[in-house]
Amino acid sequence: MRIKPGTYPGTLTDYGISETKAGDPQVFLIFDVNAGDQGNYSMTWYGLMNTVAKESGKKAPIEYTIKTILDCGFSGESPELLAAGPESNLMPLGIAMDLRVEDNTYDGTTTSRIRFVNVPGQGGGPGRVGYEEVTKKVSVDAIRAELIKQRANRPHVEKKQDVGW
């Protein structure tokens, strides 16, 4: 199964613990993914439980896994409790998330996979900054001057009366 890479809404339908091909435990989250005109798909996100980073200076995989399950509403004391699946009531089924889907090529076959699970509106989009951060990096006076200049060159448009629709 393959869909165009992008961010899609999805709802959590199942979760638990499975094993990697190497036999290591991993969290799995299954989502119903709404890929718009491409259709709806059931897709699985996997989160490793390794506590040691593979490369120096990188985060350990469990850090990403814990962030993801907390974003999905995990209420337990420890991730291994997810092994009981939805019967544990540790995560709310039906929670809406934004899912970053990317191509994944393995052994010459390319499929789609969920790379990131984000709280709706918090992943991959623009991040807000405050007024102070903006004014440190740009000349507000120059921006205002450009705005005034461009407004002056536009034809005046009468404000339309509200017709109460």
Image (cartoon, rainbow, N blue to C red):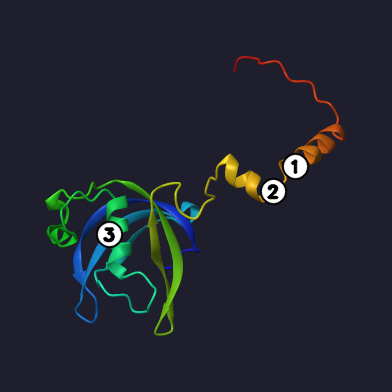
Q: Is residue 159 above or below residue 32?
A: above
Q: What label sits on residue 143 in the rendered view?
A: 1
Q: Earlier in the sequence, mark 3 or mark 2?
A: 3
Q: Earlier in the sequence, mark 2 or mark 1?
A: 2
Q: Amino acid at mark 1?
A: Ile
Q: Is residue 58 above or below residue 16?
A: below
Q: What label sits on residue 70 in the rendered view?
A: none
Crowdedness of circle 2 by 10 Å Cα count: few (<14), some, many (20+)? few
Cα gap from disc 1 to disc 3, whole angstroms: 42 Å
In the displayed structure, does residue 74 sit left or right of residue 10?
Answer: left
Question: Residue at (64%, 48%) from the top-left corner?
Answer: 136
Q: Which residue is mark 3?
A: 66
The local secondary structure at tag 2 comes to loop
Question: Residue at (38%, 72%) from the top-left corner?
Answer: 58
Nearer to us: label 3 or label 2: 2
CB under 8 Å between callouts 3 and 2?
Answer: no
Cα gap from disc 2 to disc 1, whole angstroms: 8 Å
Q: Which residue is mark 2?
A: 138
Question: Residue at (29%, 62%) from the top-left corner?
Answer: 65
